[in-house]
Amino acid sequence: MNHKEGFFTGVREKEIYYQAWLPEGEVKAVLLIVHGMAEHSGRYGNVVDHFVPQGYAVYGLDHVGHGKSEGTRVYVDGFEDFTDTLKMYYDMIREWQPEKPIFLVGHSMGSLISSTYLLDHQDDLAGAILSGVLVKVPEDISPVVVFMGNVLSSLAPKMGLMKLDATAVSQDPAVVDAYVNDPLVYTGKYTTRLGAELIKAMERVSAHMSAIRIPLLLLQGGADKLVDPSGAKMLYAKAGSEDKTLKIYEGFYHEVYNEPGRDQVLEDMEAWLE
């Protein structure tokens, strides 16, 4: 396969890193990876290794404030910083791969970015594959907590709020060790502004799920400790798509592509794409 990388200027003039893995021959379709919070586009090697030899081109970008891209770590001025930059990258890919079907592959926070993106741009896409489906406001977050989060987002937007539990990403100790020791993974606390913007995006997606009409594949770990599996079930039930599939992998943690049983996940994804 061929690997390409570079930078483009995203929202607020931030330099955004992107990369692509291309097959040797004809491109069958495009998978556009939309990664999760605090991580980066280089952590999807299992997806790349499975699909590129089959003729799929895989593209990814590091969100603003993530990986090799510019910006304060795990911070955005507004959620549109993610979605507007994704649209810029999509337009670049469309120029490089005219007429090829493009599928979003969004994980965790990336599934929320992807779902929000679909509300505005779904007609440009062939379908979406979402894993660790973050679309539902957690039930343990009260209106008072949301209100206080919005206040802190305004008064101290870059204040650290909470860390992600690295041990919850995968049951594979090697994956957790690689995650913790990856210099491009941010292991500090995510910011109050990002937390508030995530809640707003979840509220928007929850209110408009029926407007999503394109083919959907939802992949969810049944033992996910970072994202409540009920979010995937809710999106499956409420999405307006005629073609929609929900796969719940019992006992799987958050990163279904990096779990010991990932071969089944990748095979299910392949069968759905084909």
Image (cartoon, rainbow, N blue to C red):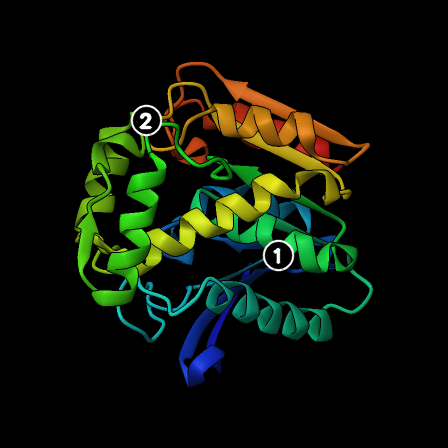
- Horizontally, residue 96 falls left or right of residue 234, namely right
Instruction: Please report the residue visible at 23 percent of the width from the left and 66 percent of the height from the top.
Output: 155
Q: Is mark 2 on a helix, strand or loop?
A: loop
Give how far apart the Cα atoms at labels 2 and 1 are.
Answer: 25 Å
Frontmost residue, 73 versus 39: 73
Q: Residue at x 29, y 41 (%)?
A: 145
Amino acid at the residue labelled 2: Lys
Q: Image check: 166 left or right of 271?
A: left
Q: Position of residue 232 (x, y in %)?
A: 55, 29
User: Mark 2 or 1 closer to N-term?
Assistant: 1
Q: Which residue lies furthest to the top in this view?
A: 250
Residue 131 versus residue 153: which sits nearer the camera?
153
Three-letter code, disc 1: Tyr
Image quadrant in which the C terminus is located: top right
Q: Residues within 10 Å of mark 2 (few under 14, many from 20)?
A: some
Q: In this view, does 175 lie above or below 35?
A: above
Which quarter shows the N terminus?
bottom right
Write down the residue under mark 1: 117
In this view, 5 is above or below 212: below
In this orientation, which residue lies closer to the viewer: 111 or 28? 111
For the point 29% across and 25% down, which residue is it? 171
Q: Report which residue position mark 2 lands on.
A: 225
